Amino acid sequence: MTDLIQKIMQETGLDEATARKTVDITGSYLKKRMPEVLADRMDDLLKGESLGDSFKEKARQTATVTRDQLEEAFKDMSEKTSEAVDQIKDRIDRLFEKKK
């Protein structure tokens, strides 16, 4: 944000406090009008970070959470499928035992 404040001061002649307030007001205004995923990155942009780096980190975090959730879901499905197969086997065995 320091770079942006300095640029505003140089190009407008505003003092530092006014330039800082301008950045804060503009950032808040834009964040309210952006999709949440972009609004979350606004603070990073104002700090001088690149939007690409922010998105890469957010995407990595989202991918990790999604992977963990999928692993858990597949593990649960595997267990339920095994249980269902065991129940079917038991019923088939009982069916054929009755016929003997």
Image: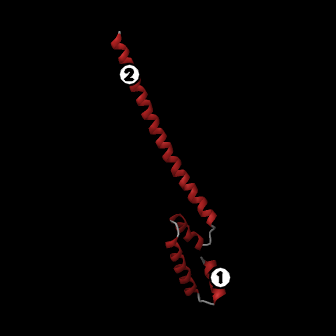
Q: Quadrant of residue 43?
A: bottom right
Amino acid carrying mark 2 in the image: Asp
Q: Quadrant of residue 87?
A: top left
Q: In this orientation, which residue lies closer to the viewer: 27 or 94?
A: 94
Q: Residue at x 33, y 13 (%)?
A: 98
Q: Residue at x 41, y 26 (%)?
A: 86
Position in image of residue 75 (x %, y %): 47, 38
Position in image of residue 70 (x %, y %): 50, 45
Q: Which residue is mark 2?
A: 90
Amino acid carrying mark 1 in the image: Lys
Calculate the distance from the C-alpha at mark 2 to the C-alpha at mark 1.
76 Å
The quadrant of the rendering that contains the N terminus is: bottom right
Position in image of residue 95 (x %, y %): 36, 17
Work out whether 82 lies above or below 95.
below
Work out whether 54 lies above or below 79.
below
Position in image of residue 53 (x %, y %): 62, 63
* SS at circle 2: helix
Q: Which residue is mark 1?
A: 7
- Numbered mark located on residue 52 in the image: none
